[in-house]
């Protein structure tokens, strides 16, 4: 289970609206001093993610809580969001490349456009798969406990 601390910013019936700071992995990386990603994350500044969870620990506004997400859910979400669109882009590009005659003057441009269309279509499909009721319940973080200062 992957755990993260979040702050309660609103309570609505039995749901909590939480805000968690988005972290970059840069603080643990040995290449941080010379890495462009580290500099970019400093330049962009602090970013926050908001999401809802069921209030199973009787938390109130201002409380810090610990939420968890199963590793399998993180892997499934990553595959849907990153891997499938890239695979679709490659497959669409290869198919277009094999179907378009070599003599075509705009062959490379057409292959590029078809690849982008494949990427976009799979992004839309992935978004719909993630938003489906069955996946939403499995990919939603769960509230584990209130965060006690110092733990």
Image (spheres, rainbow, N blue to C red):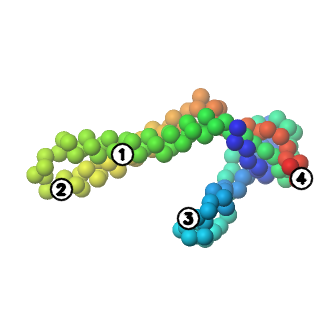
Q: Position of residue 83 (x, y in %)?
A: 46, 43
Please tell me how crowded label 3 is: few (under 14), some (14-19), or many (20+) other residues with Cα within 10 Å: some
Residue occupied by mark 4: 149
Residue occupied by mark 1: 89
| Structural distance between the alpha carbons of marks 3 and 2 | 36 Å
Residue occupied by mark 3: 37
| Structural distance between the alpha carbons of marks 4 and 3 | 31 Å
Q: Tell me if label 3 and label 2 are in contact, CB under 8 Å.
A: no
The front one of 123 and 42 is 42
Q: Which mark is residue 106?
A: 2
Picture layout, residue 72 above or below residue 93? above
Instruction: Pick whichever of labels 4 and 1 is earlier in the sequence.
Output: 1
Q: Position of residue 103 (x, y in %)?
A: 10, 52
> Does dot 1 land on a helix, a strand or a loop?
helix
Instruction: Pick whichever of labels 4 and 2 is earlier in the sequence.
Output: 2
Q: Is residue 71 left or right of residue 120?
A: right
């Amino acid at each position: 289970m992957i755990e993260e601390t979040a702050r309660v910013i609103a309570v609505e019936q039995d749901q909590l609206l939480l805000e968690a700071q988005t972290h970059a992995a840069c603080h643990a990386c040995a290449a941080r001093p010379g890495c462009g990603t580290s500099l970019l994350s400093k330049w962009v500044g602090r970013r926050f993610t908001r999401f809802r969870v069921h209030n199973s620990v009787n938390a109130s506004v201002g409380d810090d809580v610990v939420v968890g997400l199963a590793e399998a859910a993180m892997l499934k979400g990553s595959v849907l969001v990153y891997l499938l669109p890239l695979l679709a882009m490659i497959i669409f590009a290869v198919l277009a490349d094999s179907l378009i005659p070599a003599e075509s003057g705009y062959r490379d441009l057409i292959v590029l456009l078809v690849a982008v269309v494949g990427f976009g279509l799979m992004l839309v499909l992935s978004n719909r798969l993630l938003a489906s009721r069955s996946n939403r319940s499995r990919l939603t973080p769960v509230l584990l406990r209130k965060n006690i200062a110092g733990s």
